[in-house]
Image (cartoon, rainbow, N blue to C red):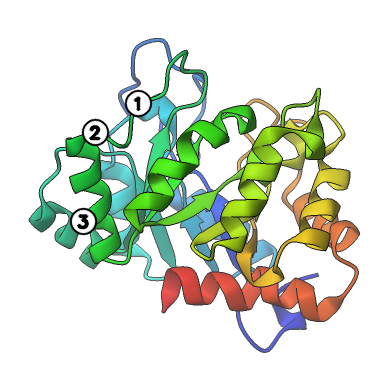
Amino acid sequence: MSSEAWDVPVVDAHVHIFTTAMPLVGNPRHRPSYSFTAEDLIATLDRHGVPMAVIAAASPWGDYNDYTITALRRYPRLRGTVILKPDVERDALERLKAEGVVGVRLPYISMAQIPDVTQPDFRKFLHRLADLDMHVHPHIEGEKLPHLLPGLEASGVKIVIDHIGRPDPATGINGDGFKAMLRSIERGRTWVKLSAAYRQDGAALGWAQELVRRADPARLLWASDCPFVGEEKHVQYQQTIDWLSAVVSDAKTRRQIMCDTPLRLYFS
């Protein structure tokens, strides 16, 4: 499948770019030994007929957003998220939005205790993002979503959850995290990415099919998670496209997930 199957462009809603020269945070979750540049990304997209993509900020580089912003300036077909401290001022957010930044990633995965987003600095931060029609993109284990989502929802900001919500493998779709995610979708400001199946220990297909069955497809997005950090030798880009066909058999629904919804969310 490629974008040639549709009369509107396919959008890959979650990709990464980086170089070995970029400064890592202390004790990063991943330490890639190679670069995957903006030019590598563009070449990968072009080989698979995917015209547009959204760069997801990655926790190994923290709030070093420089390379992403440079790529957004160079390629209008890209959008991106960044990692920021909550004391960022509105004028800085306005400049980032003008560069093609559409949201802020919250790098909370593997944290023993997640930040309290109901504190004054965070409330101000989230309110500014909502005012600018930007979203937050929590990077967090699914079982922690019930603790995080209420504060985010109360702020009025848009929420985009990655990787099928990362359900707890022990409980899957019956877990509190998956249920909290479904309730958040129903309340109307939350989207979820059907992505990174290769990180979910073989259970992702069933989880994704249940999400498609129970959630409004207009709240779902497809993404590759390219370049598959840590699993580069085992995952190919085309597999991520083919996987969505296994999740969603209906072509009209696939178009909504791969084209219509991400175009409205990221490029309108």
Which residue carries the number 1 mark?
115
Quarter-wise, where is residue 61 in the image?
top left
Which residue carries the number 2 mark?
119
Disc 2 from disc 1: Cα separation: 9 Å
> Marks 1 and 2: in contact by CB < 8 Å?
yes
Which residue carries the number 3 mark?
128
Quarter-wise, where is residue 187 in the image?
bottom right
| Tag 3: amino acid | Arg
- 206 sits left or right of 91 in the view: right
- 216 sits left or right of 45 in the view: right
**Residue at the (61%, 62%) spot, across then down:** 186
Disc 2 from disc 3: Cα separation: 14 Å
Query: Which element type, helix, strand or loop, lies under badge 1?
Result: loop
Q: Can you see residue 20? A: no
- x, y percent for residue 153: 43, 51
- x, y percent for residue 231: 70, 29
- x, y percent for residue 225: 62, 45
